[in-house]
Amino acid sequence: MIRLGAGRPDRIAAVGAHCDDIAIGAGGTLLTLCQAHPGIRVDALVLSGAGGEREQEERAALAAFCPGADLRPTVRGLPDGRLPAHWAEAKAAVEELRGRIEPELVLAPRTDDAHQDHRGLARLVTTAFRDHLVLGYEIAKWDGDLGRPVAYQPLSPETAERKARLLEEHYPSQHHRPWYDREAFLGLARIRGIECHERYAEAFAVTKLTLNLGG
C-alpha cells in the first residue's frame, strides 16, 4: 500500500454522493489512469440514485470512463440532498467499501464542498481511509465554492474532449441544468490547466500527504 503517497496505483476507490459526481469531478483522471493501466481495479460507490434512470446512466457512464478496468460499481438508494439525516446508512456504505478494497488512491468530494451531501461524504471518506491518498475532486455549482487546489492531473486535449463528450452522452437527465454543458466542463479544465502549465487538467484538494523524498 502507498501510505498517503503517490505512485503507480493498481486499485482505486471512487466515491460520489450522486450519480455523475465522480464523472464530473474526476472523469478525466479515470480515463487517464485506465488507459495507462489496463486491468486496474476500480471500486465505485455512489450513495444515491439506485433503482431508476439515474442508476442506469451511472453504470453506463462509469463503464465508459473506466475502459478496460476491473470495474465494480455500487449505487445506493439514499435520498438526494438528505445525507446528514441518513448518516448511519452513509457511514455503513463507506465502511463496506473500505472493507473490500485496499486502494492506493481514493477519489472523493472535497471536505469543503458547499453541498451538504458532498461535504458529508468527504468527511466519512477521510475517516474510513485514514492511511490512503485521498484526492478531493471539485464540482462547479451556483454556490461559487471553487477554491485553490493543490494537486493537478494534466489531461491531454483528447481526454478533456472525451470527458466532455461522455458527460453529455451518458447523463441526458441532467441536460436541463444550466451548469451542465460542454463549455462549463472544458472551461474549468482549461483554467486548471493554466495553473499547472498544461492545456487541460483536473484539480484536487489534499487533506494529508506523506512524502518519501529519500526513497
Image (cartoon, rainbow, N blue to C red):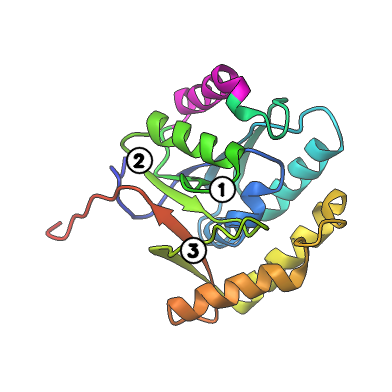
Disc 3 element: strand
Q: Label 3 neighbourhood size at 10 Å, few (<14), some (14-19), many (20+)?
A: many
Q: How far across and how far down the image is residue 188, in percent?
A: 60, 70
Amino acid found under the numbered disc labelled 3: Ala
Residue 185 image position (x, y, % from top left): 68, 67
Res. 114 mark: 1
Quadrant location of the N terminus in the rendered image: top left
Task: Identify the magenta region.
Answer: 85-101
Label disc, if present, on residue 132 of the rendered structure:
2
The residue that appears at 46% across and 27% down in the rendered structure is: 98
Residue 99 seen by the camera: yes
Dot 3 or dot 1: first in sequence order is 1
Q: Residue at x 64, y 71 (%)?
A: 160
Disc 1 on helix, strand or loop?
A: loop
Tell me which label, 3 or 2, sits earlier in the chain: 2
Query: Looking at the image, which residue is at 31% across and 37% down?
Result: 131
Residue 91 position (above or below residue 198): above
Circle 1: residue type: Ala
Q: Quadrant of the C terminus?
A: bottom left
